[in-house]
Every structure is written in structure tokens, then in C-alpha cells.
Amino acid sequence: MKKVIVMGAAGEVGFAIVEEFLQAGFEVLAPTRRASELEKLRALLAPNLRERLAVYGCDLMLPQDRMSLGQRAKSFSADGVVASLGGWYQDGPLERMSLENWNKALQNNLTSHFLAAQTLLPQLRPNEKSFCVMIGGGAAFEHVPGAAHVSVAAAAQLMLIKSFKAEYQDRDIRFFNPVFMTPLVTRSRGRHSIQWITASLVGKMCVAFGETEAEVETVMPIHSLAMAQELVNAWEKQ
Ligand SMILES: NC(=O)c1ccc[n+]([C@@H]2O[C@H](COP(=O)([O-])OP(=O)(O)OC[C@H]3O[C@@H](n4cnc5c(N)ncnc54)[C@H](OP(=O)(O)O)[C@@H]3O)[C@@H](O)[C@H]2O)c1
């Protein structure tokens, strides 16, 4: 059975990704700081899906948690890792931002991706075609007043994944950072446009990327629901 580790699984987008991997028959390991919340979401799944999801309490920022996660990931022996980490919020202009808030934004949106990849990539199943996906947002390309701290981290995330790809060129790992240019329709979002990409389609895209033989650009802006659907359809055929 194929296996994947999903970081940020208790999150709005992360849990939709988990559901799609479970639907596709994967076994999923989900390290999270919010294990009890994730257990509640797990309990809502159909029994045949629920039994393939393992919730694992872990705070990436704690060295001892990273060490135990590395060991757990080694024995789990995943085919891939998906990171759906960080979030978007406005916090005023850079001119008035406190160092504390700046550091927090970089920690949640950038350092979390760095630590997830650093901890988990060496533990992927050796000698097999494996994959790493980091979920990105349009903030990487667009400035929104009051959210520059998120944009800076999101833009740096694109170089982060390219750097891991370069460092791992001897290992058969495929890297992908889709950059979603619309807000995502998640479980708790109310009013939304029908043009917006759904979190479940993000999950389907991660599954399709994990399974496709197609050549895929490492960093790819995804501009619309139609574009996301087209890519998934194309990858599912290859
Ligand atoms: N929502 C959207 O409309 C949208 C649009 C485009 C792109 N995206 C992208 O989708 C991704 C997830 O967004 P979301 O809306 O699902 O956010 P979310 O609901 O807030 O979930 C974010 C996840 O990030 C994890 N996280 C945050 N700070 C962390 C830290 N310091 N250490 C470890 N884990 C940390 C949390 O993990 P724990 O479970 O451990 O707390 C949480 O599950 C982000 O990369 C975002 O840019 C979202």
C-alpha cells in the first residue's frame, strides 16, 4: 500500500488533502500540534478510511519532537510528504510590525516548511520514486496591504523547495509547489466564488502528482478551478 505523510493535516486545506489520499487508497501519517482536533475530524470519516489515518502529536518547533518524528517517519517509510503549513492574515504595514510578529510569520509560514522537509525527506522510502509537495498561496507573487510578512515567507518558500530539489538531485524525489492564486474553498469557508479552487481539488492534485509520470514544473501558479481540474485530468491519464 502507498503511504504519505501530511503536515498541517488539522488545517483547513490539510484535512482535505488527507481525505483525498485516503480515498485514493493511501495510508496516511498526520503529525500535528492539534492531535485532539484531528482525532475529531478522523472520527467523522467512513470506517474504511479512518483506519488508514494515523494521528501523531508533534510540534515541529521542538527539537525532541522532530527527533521522534524522524524515527516514526523512518519506520512508516512513506512514498511522499505533503506540507500544508502556515496561513494568511493581515497584521499592519511592515513599518509598524513588531519583531515578534515578523518572526512568528516566518516561523509559521517558512521555517515550518524547512523543518518538515529537513526532518522527513531523509526518511522517505529509499530507491523508489517518491514525492514532496509544499502547498503555496498567491501571496508569493502579490502584495496585499498589511500582509507583506506572509508574502515574504511565501516567496521564500518557492526558493526553499527549489533548494531542496537541488540538494536531493541524486535521490529520485519529485518536488512540487503549486501556488494557488484564488482563495481556497475549505470546510469552514462560507460565501465563495464558483471560480475558486476547492481544497478537495488541491488534495486530488497532490494525489495525482504523487502518481503521475508526467514532467511537472517545480513551482507552478494555478490560476483557476478549471486549470487545476485540467492538470489533475492530464496527470491521472499518465
Ligand atoms: N485557505 C486558503 O484560502 C489558501 C489559499 C491559497 C493557499 N493556501 C495555502 O494552504 C496552506 C494551508 O492553509 P490553511 O488555510 O489550511 O491554514 P490553516 O487552517 O491555518 O492550517 C495551517 C496548518 O499549518 C500548521 N502550522 C502553522 N504554523 C505552524 C508551526 N509553527 N509549526 C508547525 N505547523 C504549523 C498548523 O498545524 P497544526 O495542526 O500542527 O496546528 C495548521 O494545521 C498554506 O500554505 C496556505 O498558504 C491557503
Image: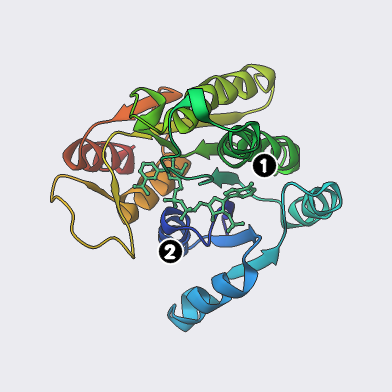
Residue 172 horizontal/vertical position (percent): 62, 28
Q: As shown in the figure, which amino acid type bears the numbered disc 2?
A: Glu
Q: Is residue 190 visible?
A: yes
Colour scheme in use: rainbow
Q: Which disc number belongs to residue 116?
A: 1
Instruction: Please tell me whether mark 2 sits on a helix, a strand or a loop.
Output: helix
The quadrant of the picture occupied by the N terminus is bottom right
Residue 186 horizontal/vertical position (percent): 33, 58
Disc 2 crowd rating (10 Å Cα; few below 14, some 14-19, many 20+) is: many
Q: Total label count?
A: 2
Of mark 1 and mark 2, the one earlier in the sequence is 2
Farthest residue toward the front?
Answer: 96
Q: State whether residue 88 is above or below residue 7.
A: above
Q: Is residue 209 left or right of residue 9?
A: left
Pick whichever, 105 or 208, lies toward us.
Answer: 105
Pick whichever, 115 or 165, lies toward us.
Answer: 115
Residue 237 horizontal/vertical position (percent): 29, 41
Q: Is residue 184 left or right of residue 127?
A: left
Residue 178 horizontal/vertical position (percent): 40, 33
Instruction: Please tell me whether mark 1 sits on a helix, a strand or a loop.
Output: helix
* Residues at marks 1 and 2, CA–CA distance in whole angstroms: 20 Å
Q: Which disc number belongs to residue 141?
A: none
The residue located at (64%, 60%) in the rendering is 32
- Residue 137 appears in which quarter of the rendering? top left
The residue located at (41%, 65%) in the rendering is 23
Q: Is residue 215 visible?
A: no
Farthest residue toward the left?
Answer: 194
- Residue 76 appears in which quarter of the rendering? bottom right
Disc 1 crowd rating (10 Å Cα; few below 14, some 14-19, many 20+) is: many
Q: As shown in the figure, which amino acid type bears the numbered disc 1?
A: Ala
Q: Which disc number belongs to residue 19?
A: 2
